[in-house]
Image (cartoon, rainbow, N blue to C red):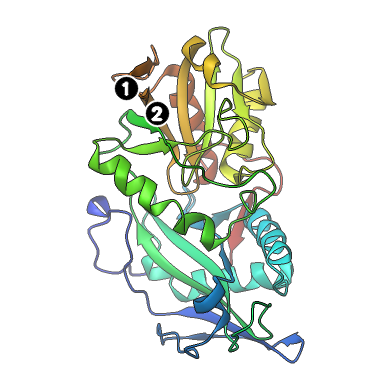
């Protein structure tokens, strides 16, 4: 297939309109059949639940061109499952998981000209999202919703390539202990915008959020999970009920154990431990895994020996293996790769 005229190697992580998107509507207790449309505009009532009370959730995944020329997605079934969990927590109707996968396939096939060529380092990013559309004034769930998926070609999430990042410990909290931090709700990201703007203004790439109850344990950043490596080579990821369960983080832990032979621990991580770790990375769909070189907490600076100038050995290996699995250079575990026919 002839590809769109795009400089794939110069892509950033931003929105580029593609021809087709999928739309389904929920009304009178049921979803309609849904369909592809070329209209990117969303028209809703001024009192729609999403505008008044932020009743919305979303997902993010990518489509790639594999070595064999096939177009594939990476573990979209987990995105469907996580969106179900988000919808239930926000009192929204679940969009059926099988229909989620079918819609992903439809959108990717319809926009196949925008899936970058193998080896470009770029991808077609898919954004499934759901929002409340019926008018509300009193605080209550909406009765009508839209589920949509649009696609946009993207390059690296962090500009400048895979270079070590500098973080600050945020004075703000990301999520309440029994709040919505473990679901992909839009409101979680809205509250992080001031914190990330503040961090950028102070010269940092991102924030590290501590647990809101004790402010002694590492949680995540505004949009990625943490992954650490200790002096023995053990891969460690923070556990918390208010951390979003990252699909990429779970995949990297599997790669660490099954492909690299590393010991893996998913447990509470105290901030005081960080000085004993040799590597730190941020992992998520957009970034895969990005190395962290320094974390600043007031007058204290924690430097990671492996990662100040370039990614540490384990961080680099994890990234290389996972991206190779995603593009078909290495055999994937069963069920990880979803081929778009």
User: Residue lying farthest front?
Assistant: 138
In depth, the one of 40 and 86 nearer the eye is 86
In which quadrant will I find the N terminus? bottom left
Residue, x 48% and y 55% (percent of image)? 189
Q: In the rendered image, which quarter is residue 215 located in?
A: top right
In the structure shown, which secondary structural element does the residue marked by tag 1 occupy?
A: loop
Residue 298, image x, y percentages: 35, 24
The answer to whether residue 338 is above or below residue 246 is: below
In the structure shown, which secondary structural element does the residue marked by tag 2 occupy?
A: strand
In depth, the one of 131 and 318 nearer the eye is 131
The residue to which callout 2 is attached is 291
From mark 1 to mark 2, how far is it between C-alphas?
Answer: 8 Å
Mark closest to the chain's N terminus, 1 or 2:
2
In which quadrant will I find the C terminus? bottom right
Residue 307, image x, y percentages: 37, 19
In the image, 309: left or right of 112?
left
The answer to whether residue 44 is above or below residue 92 is: below
* Residues at marks 1 and 2 touching, judged by CB atoms closer than 8 Å: yes
Residue 308 shows in the view = yes
User: Residue lying farthest top?
Assistant: 232
Residue 79, image x, y percentages: 63, 57
Residue 194, image x, y percentages: 36, 51
Answer few, some or many: residues within 10 Å of disc 1's Cα (few below 14, many 20 plus, some between 14 and 19).
Answer: some
Residue 70 shows in the view = no
The residue to which callout 1 is attached is 310
Task: Please tell me how many numbered marks the rendered image carries.
Answer: 2
Answer few, some or many: residues within 10 Å of disc 2's Cα (few below 14, many 20 plus, some between 14 and 19).
Answer: many
Using the image, tell me which numbered label, if any, was put on residue 67.
Answer: none
Residue, x 33% and y 31% (percent of image)? 165
């Amino acid at each position: 297939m002839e590809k769109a005229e795009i400089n794939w190697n110069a892509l950033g992580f931003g929105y580029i309109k593609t021809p087709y998107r999928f739309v389904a509507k929920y009304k009178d207790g049921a979803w309609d059949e849904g369909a592809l449309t070329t209209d990117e505009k969303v028209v809703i009532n001024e009192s729609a639940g999403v505008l008044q009370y932020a009743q919305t959730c979303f997902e993010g995944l990518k489509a790639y061109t594999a070595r064999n020329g096939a177009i594939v997605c990476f573990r979209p079934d987990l995105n469907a499952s996580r969106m179900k969990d988000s919808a239930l927590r926000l009192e929204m109707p679940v969009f059926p998981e099988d229909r989620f996968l079918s819609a992903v396939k439809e959108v990717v096939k319809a926009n196949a000209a925008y899936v970058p060529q193998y080896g470009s380092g770029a991808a077609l990013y898919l954004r499934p999202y759901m929002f409340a559309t019926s008018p509300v004034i009193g605080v209550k769930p909406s009765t009508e919703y839209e589920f949509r998926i649009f696609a946009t070609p993207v390059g690296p999430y962090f500009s400048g390539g895979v270079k070590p990042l500098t973080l600050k410990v945020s004075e703000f909290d990301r999520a309440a202990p029994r709040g919505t931090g473990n679901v992909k709700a839009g409101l979680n990201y809205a509250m992080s915008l001031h914190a990330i703007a503040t961090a950028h203004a102070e010269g940092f790439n991102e924030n590290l959020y501590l647990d809101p109850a004790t402010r002694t344990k590492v949680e995540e950043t505004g949009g990625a999970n943490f992954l650490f490596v200790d002096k023995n080579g053990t891969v460690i990821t923070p556990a918390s009920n208010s951390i979003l369960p990252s699909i990429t983080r779970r995949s990297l832990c599997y790669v660490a154990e099954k492909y690299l032979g590393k010991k893996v621990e998913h447990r509470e991580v105290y901030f005081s431990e960080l000085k004993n770790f040799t590597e730190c990375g941020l992992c998520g769909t957009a970034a895969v895994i990005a190395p962290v070189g320094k974390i600043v907490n007031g007058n204290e600076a924690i430097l990671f020996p492996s990662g100040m100038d370039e990614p540490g050995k384990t961080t680099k290996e994890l990234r290389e293996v996972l991206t190779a699995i995603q593009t078909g250079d290495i055999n994937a575990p069963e069920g990880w790769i979803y081929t778009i026919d």
